[in-house]
Amino acid sequence: MNKLMVIFLILFLSGCSLIFYREPYTLNRYADWVNANTNESVSNDDFGFCYSKAKSEVMGRPVNEDEDIGGLDNYYKTYPILGKCLYEKGYRFKVKHFIVYCYNKPRECKAYRNYMKLDFDTEW
């Protein structure tokens, strides 16, 4: 019993959290942009428009659809712009498992926190 407690204590102190860890591909099921009225997922056209708009604002010039925006820092800068655009088009960022999702994806949560719709009832 003492060995088990020591193992849990070491994992806890090291920052290794087995409770909240999820593989990246499973996290995508925990959050999605949905229409506020119909609860349907965002259309590819609306998402593409807002993503292109966000990339253009970050780069300071119009960019092609397939053009790289210059690294992860610029990619993360698109989140608030993308969120605002989708929100203005009537979409909300629906999060089912808020604690697990935000523990693993803090940048997305910080950028989209004003546009979130928490959902604890819906099965996806």
Image (spheres, rainbow, N blue to C red):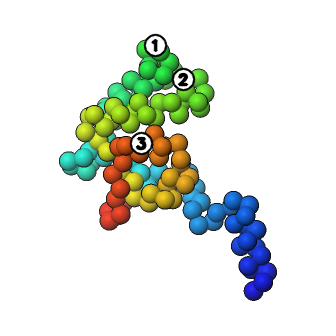
Upstream in the sequence, badge 2 or badge 1? 1
Q: Quadrant of the N terminus?
A: bottom right
Residue at numbered disc 3: 112
Residue that appears at 35% across and 63% down: 120
In the rendered structure, the answer to whether residue 73 lies left or right of residue 41 reads: right
Other-residue count near label 2 (Cα within 10 Å), few / some / many at <14 / 14–19 / ≥20: some
Upstream in the sequence, badge 2 or badge 3? 2
In the rendered structure, the answer to whether residue 41 lies left or right of residue 16 reads: left
Disc 1 to disc 3, how far (Cα)? 24 Å
Residue at numbered disc 2: 69
Whether residue 6 is visible to the viewer of this picture, yes or no, is yes
Image location (x, y in percent) of residue 18:
63, 65
Residue that appears at 42% across and 26% down: 54
Is residue 56 placed above or below 120 in the rendered structure?
above
Question: Of the residues shown, which amino acid type is indicated by label 3?
Answer: Tyr
Residue at numbered disc 1: 61
Frontmost residue, 96 versus 49: 96
SS type, badge 2: loop
